[in-house]
Structures are given as structure tokens and as C-alpha cells.
Amino acid sequence: VQLQASGGGLVQAGGSLRLSCAASGTINDMGWYRQAPGKQRELVASISSRGSTRYGDSVTGRFTISRDNTKKTVYLQMNSLKPEDTAVYYCKVNAWTPTRGSNDYWGQGTQVTVSS
């Protein structure tokens, strides 16, 4: 299973960014996590294979997760960005393979920096 994340960058507070993560294989749940310097990695948002979503408390109402199953891609639309959203964002997918069964896979991470 390979993951390719893109879309990070530098944006001013109040701005928007859209992250994308393309996966291969038989994909189940997909999600985004983030890790700021000195902090633990935390859930940003997740979406099941049927489209059920879950959000971290700090991003609810500002971020929207979606997926395109034909492209095996998960998106994270981030609006009203705040400096505290600055972190490395990682996509994670749960995928099934014939050799390993169902496992979690992580993307390489993409930096999001929000300036005040």
C-alpha cells in the first residue's frame, strides 16, 4: 500500500488549504492526523468507507474531510486556519492486502504552517 500526500504549505491565519492523499490497494477507513512540535500525534478527521466522518474537537466546523473512492483519495479542506493548526499532517488509511490482511498505513507527512 502506497500513500502520496500533498497540499501543505504556508498560509496566513484565516486562510484555507486543501490536503490530498492518494492511496493504492483495497482501502477501508481513511483519515488525517497531525503532530505539532513537542506534542503527541492527534486525530484531525477520519472517514469510513461508507462516508461516516469524525472530527477532532479543535477542528470541528472549520475542517471537512471527504473521499473519492474511484480515485482512492482522501481530502482535507481546512478553512479559517489558526496558528495553532501548524503541524505536520499525516494521512492514514486502513487497507486490506492478501498477504497482510487489514492494517494501518501512514503517509510521509506534509507541513502546514499558519502565520499570525
Image: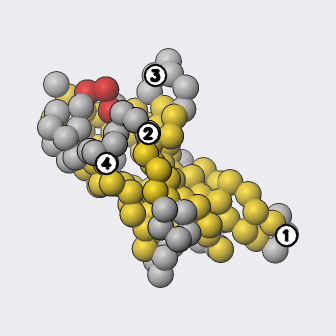
Read off the residue under disc 4: 63
Q: Are marks 2 and 1 in contact (CB under 8 Å)?
A: no
Vertical position of residue 100 compared to residue 81: above or below: below
Read off the residue under disc 3: 37
Q: Residues within 10 Å of mark 4 (few under 14, many from 20)?
A: many
Would you say 103 lies left or right of 93 here? Answer: right
> Tag 1 or tag 2, which sits nearer the N-term?
2
In the image, what residue occupies the spot 55% across and 26% down? Answer: 40
In the image, what residue occupies the spot 31% across and 26% down? Answer: 84
Read off the residue under disc 2: 56
> Tag 3 or tag 4, which sits nearer the N-term?
3
> Tag 2 or tag 4, which sits nearer the N-term?
2
In this orientation, does residue 109 appear?
Answer: no
C-alpha separation, residue under disc 4 versus residue under disc 1: 35 Å
Q: Residues within 10 Å of mark 1 (few under 14, many from 20)?
A: few
Helix or strand or loop: what does disc 1 sit on?
A: loop
Closer to us: mark 4 or mark 1?
4
State the mark number for residue 99.
Answer: 1
Name the residue at the bottom extreme: 70
Q: Nearer the viewer, residue 66 or 88?
A: 66
